[in-house]
Image (tube, grey):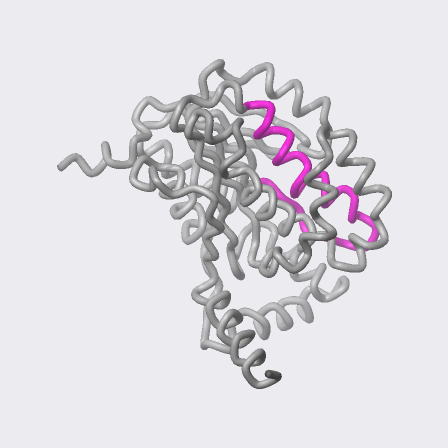
């Protein structure tokens, strides 16, 4: 059995946004090992020896449009790994980078994605419980263009800030994926769409996340994140490969019947929360 062939990446055109560091870089390096033609984009310089690399600010529609003109006519797999942390006053930019640009970029590429192609976005454990926020998220999903979504974000900036913009964007990613797994544009060509939702992971954004969680105090934020994600189970921080590799798997031929799924990669924290919620319901009933 040819194990490399099982992945199905040999000679395939793969687009990775957010390939310069962290999870996106880990995914890129594995894709290269598996023989893929990788077209990589990032705000920062991409180091791995990809087919072609592009510098792009994913909050800027004009730059995204320019990137789209430079990508190949046929694309087999799409990985959107880009994101930023939240800070006071940047709620709209968080929505642009962490959700609106993902959706816009993926939908712009859909006509080029091959039959039985695959799309995977990096969401977050911060998107857990997306179902309970559907009433707020649905109007955003109903917007049709980058500009309409941007206007929605500006009009709802206060509410987004109140509900933690990073989490709002990640819930929107998971909600979008769930809502579109059987959308004609995807299912018509059997294009799979999934998300992964990482837990606490050491990446180039870790310092920003810690500062955000600690309201500017990096040490306090680190302690808070450890308390939320790690101390309850004697845990440790994941590494970028712990997220990038499963992402490559879920877009591979080995996962060819998996679509519409959010893969929570937080060492069972979501399972613990699910059971705790059920037990709380029994007690209250």
Q: Residue furthest front?
A: 285
Q: Quadrant of the N terminus?
A: top left
Residue at coordinates 72% horizontally, 66% vertically from top-left?
Answer: 214
Residue 97 magenta: yes
Q: Is residue 143 left or right of residue 268?
A: right
Answer above or below: position of 214 versus 66: below
Q: Is residue 223 left or right of residue 261?
A: right
Q: Nearer the viewer, residue 234 or 279?
A: 279
Q: Is residue 194 left or right of residue 123?
A: left
Q: Nearer the viewer, residue 132 or 252?
A: 132
Q: Position of residue 265 (x, y in %)?
A: 46, 57
Residue 178 magenta: no
Residue at coordinates 65% horizontally, 47% vertically from top-left?
Answer: 172
Q: Position of residue 251 (x, y in %)?
A: 40, 38
Q: Nearer the viewer, residue 57 or 139?
A: 139
Q: Position of residue 136 (x, y in %)?
A: 74, 51
Q: Main secondary structure of the magenta part?
A: helix
Task: Give the magenta range.
Answer: 82-109
Which quadrant would residue 141 be assigned to in this image?
A: top right
Is residue 218 visible in the rendered structure shown here? yes
Residue at coordinates 72% horizontally, 52% vertically from top-left?
Answer: 135
Residue at coordinates 69% horizontally, 23% vertically from top-left?
Answer: 63
Q: Quadrant of the C terminus?
A: bottom right
Is residue 19 visible in the rendered structure shown here? no
């Amino acid at each position: 059995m040819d194990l490399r062939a099982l992945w199905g990446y040999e000679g395939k055109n793969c687009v990775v946004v957010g390939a310069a560091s962290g999870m996106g870089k880990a995914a890129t390096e594995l894709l290269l090992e598996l023989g893929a033609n990788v077209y990589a984009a990032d705000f920062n310089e991409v180091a791995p020896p990809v087919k072609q690399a592009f510098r792009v600010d994913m909050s800027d529609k004009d730059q995204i449009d320019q990137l789209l003109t430079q990508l190949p006519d046929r694309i087999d797999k799409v990985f959107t790994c880009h994101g930023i942390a939240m800070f006071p006053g940047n709620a709209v930019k968080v929505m642009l980078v962490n959700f609106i640009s993902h959706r816009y970029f993926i939908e712009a590429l859909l006509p080029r994605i091959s039959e039985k192609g695959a799309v995977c976005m990096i969401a977050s454990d911060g998107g857990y419980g997306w179902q309970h926020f559907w009433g707020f998220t649905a109007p955003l999903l109903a917007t049709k263009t980058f500009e309409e979504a941007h206007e929605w974000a500006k009009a709802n900036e206060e509410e987004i800030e109140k509900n933690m913009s990073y989490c709002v964007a990640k819930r929107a990613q998971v909600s979008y994926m769930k809502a579109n797994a059987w959308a004609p544009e995807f299912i018509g060509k059997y294009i799979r769409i999934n998300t992964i939702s990482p837990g606490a992971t050491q990446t180039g954004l870790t310092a920003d996340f810690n500062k955000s969680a600690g309201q500017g105090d990096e040490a306090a934020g680190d302690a808070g994140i450890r308390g939320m994600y790690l101390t309850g189970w004697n845990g440790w921080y994941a590494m970028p490969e712990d997220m990038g590799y499963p992402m490559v798997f879920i877009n591979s031929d080995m996962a060819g019947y998996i679509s519409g799924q959010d893969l929570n990669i937080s060492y069972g924290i979501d399972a613990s929360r699910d059971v705790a919620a059920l037990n709380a319901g029994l007690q209250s009933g």
